[in-house]
Image (tube, rainbow, N blue to C red):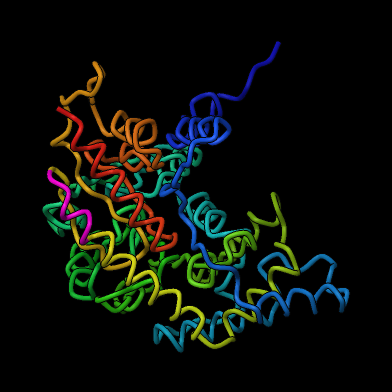
Amino acid sequence: MKQLSDRLTGLSESETIAMSQRSRELQRQGKDIINLSVGEPDFPSPPYVKEAAIAAIEDDFTHYPPVPGIPELREAIVAKFKRDNNLEYKPSQIVVSTGGKQALSNAIYALVNEGDEVIIPSPYWVSYPAMAQLAGGKSVFVYAGIDQDFKMTPQQLEDAITPKSKVLLLNSPCNPTGSVYSLEELKALAIVLERHPNVFVISDEIYEYINYEVPHHSMAEIPSLKERVIIVNGVSKGYAMTGWRIGYMAAPEWVASACSRLQGQYTSGTSTISQKAALAAIEGPLEYTRSMVDAFRRRRELVVKMANEIPGLKNNNPAGAFYLFPNVSSFFGKSFNGHTIEDARDLSFYLLEQAYVATVSGTAFGNKNCIRFSYATSDELLVEAMKRIKKALAALK
């Protein structure tokens, strides 16, 4: 008899699977699908990164690495935090993992006990609740709508904290909303956290470099909280290196040590070749990253302008990442060819079937009134996609 563990049978499937499957079916039928659902840069990895990886292979750098990462990469990450964030860390406080997702999981598993509460501002990245669930924690969602730019207020945070609260999962710049917390906003949240010394902050800063108006700031910059903040970052978004699978954390030494011990039991160290590539990225010039950000900024302005011209869409102006997360609730209850749009999931499938544009329903991110567009694709495809979306939405009556 096939019998999975309780932790796995209770784990919900990704909301995006059905959309991906249907997109592939339509493509096989010859439909011209424009994919705005992909959450990764559409640029190749920098040439100097690829050269470093090739050199590592040719130098036979192919044996088991130290579990928390090769020393030179951890030292480079320390230097990066000093250079970019004015934060002081030691190499012993850095743990390199197989992607930012593993770094997040490590931190959650290291801190959360059965029944502990994990505070998750909503909208959130799709995997946060599942990570908390697998650790035995309980997700406590703090809803922040488009009228507050999808950002949690200090009072909302205060209201969410209970004696069982253990972790606040904060993501800035945010996937899916593109919202960015300013230093002043972080300081206001910090005042609340100072009253609750048992709550740790896991700060997901993977989109750090993809910032437009507001400079990036970290909760770890606030001295009273630094010893309770675990920063998670990586090379995936800022260097177009999603497939290299390199993430890292900077944490209090006792947390970093625990995460290294945990990682040593279920994956050990990550790919030596990828670590050498990440070293080249982090130590290298930021011109390549800046050119990507310039392209994303131009695309953001293009998409927001066209979205604002679509009646019924309610948009914010994302300050970072490469997503637009419009409120589409004005279309709920409208119909096309006898099919009624009940929620954001229905609307996402409608846009796929009628406009041949793939998006992601906001229900995957904890907001049933929105859908996510990724503008990490060419200007030409974005213009065509927005034209198709406008026409399809106008057909709903």
Find out whether residue 144 is within the magenta segment. Answer: no
Horizontally, is 19 left or right of 276 in the view? left
Q: Residue at 69% of width from left, 68% of height from top?
A: 274
Image location (x, y in percent) of residue 370: 25, 42
237 vs 304, left or right, is right
Q: Position of residue 86 (x, y in %)?
A: 39, 87
Report the quarter where the C terminus lies.
top left
Specify whether 209 is left or right of 363.
right
Is 281 displayed left or right of 292 in the figure? right
Depth order, front residue of 197/271: 271
> Could you tell me which residue is drawn at 70 percent across and 57 percent down?
264
The quadrant in which residue 67 appears is: bottom right
Who is closer to the viewer here, 143 or 229? 143
Asked whether residue 230 is in view, the answer is: no
- Percent position (x, y) of residue 116? 38, 43
Indicate the quadrant where residue 15 lies.
top left
Q: Which of 2 and 327 is in front in this view?
A: 327
Q: In this view, does 352 lie above or below 334?
A: below
Position of residue 51 relative to residue 138, above or below, is below
Residue at figure coordinates x 55%, y 82% from the top left:
90
Q: Can residue 132 be seen in this view?
A: yes
Q: Is residue 125 above or below residue 369?
A: below
Work out whether residue 81 or residue 341 is closer to the camera in this orientation and state it: 341
Q: Does the magenta stretch include residue 308?
A: yes
Q: What stretch is highlighted in magenta?
A: 305-311
Q: Quadrant of residue 133?
A: top left
